Image (cartoon, rainbow, N blue to C red):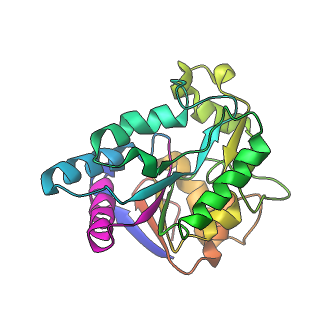
Amino acid sequence: MIIQRFDHEDALASALASRLIDAIVRNPRLVLGLPTGRTPLPVYRALRDLTARALVDWSAVRTFNLDEFAGLGGDDPGSYRAFMQEALFDHIPIDPVNIAMLDGGAPDLAEECRRYEKAIADAGGIDIQILGIGANGHIGFNEPADELHAHTHVATLQRATLDANAMLFGGDPGRVPKCALSMGMATILGARQIVMIALGEEKSDCVAGMVTDLITTRLPASFLQVHPHVTVMLDHAAASKLV
């Protein structure tokens, strides 16, 4: 792992956005894996700004989001599709047909997961996967457990994850769907490059465990240790437990 520390979130966001823009310029058909939540919001703001200033062409870029809430279609204001439209897609010149999202409103969620896996494979795999990390060490919606799913699946969310997503539902964890669709660990680890970002002291324990502890299903992010090309981008608070 390459560990990068930044003085504040804006510096981290600017560095990652510049890396992604450079990658798009080098490979206009780049395939990106994207997260949701509070952590990537500064990155998406920086991407919007750099895209506008440099007139970056996103027309052939493809994106795959990590996850989506079960039971919510893309037109639901609490969906991750709605989140991504507001945070990024409505502000960059990306072709809508190149935006891939899981459909939480699909009638057969298992079939939807299989469809998504095939779509990723048909795209040639993910070139750069951006990840956040939950305070309990989850990535995507791969929650700590005795066993982890390899591929895209329906996940049951833990209380800490419900609390972390309450912002999308008026601050009420009780309104957050109890299940979600998520890329699995093998799907995530199949990306050619992975960039993990973490902000804030509340992430410091799981970041330290991810980097230095044994690989365990009880800390899903620890599986990033086996990937050959991982960059971990942290503010000082998130890095505070690292030696």
Residue at 79% x, 58% y is 148
Residue range of the region highlighted in magenta in the rendering: 13-36
Q: Please tell me whether residue 19 belongs to the stretch shown in magenta.
A: yes
Residue 16: give x, y in percent of width and height.
33, 61
Q: Please tell me whether residue 219 belongs to the stretch shown in magenta.
A: no
User: Is the residue 200 above or below the residue 129 in the image?
Assistant: above
Q: Quadrant of residue 209?
A: bottom right
Q: Quadrant of residue 30?
A: bottom left
The front one of 85 and 139 is: 85
The front one of 149 and 25 is: 25
Identity of the residue furthest to the right in this view: 146
Res. 143 visible in picture: no
Is 16 displayed left or right of 139 in the figure? left
Residue at 26% x, 56% y is 14
Res. 192 visible in picture: yes
User: Is the residue 87 above or below the residue 97 in the image?
Assistant: above
Residue 202: give x, y in percent of width and height.
54, 46
Residue at 62% x, 31% y is 163
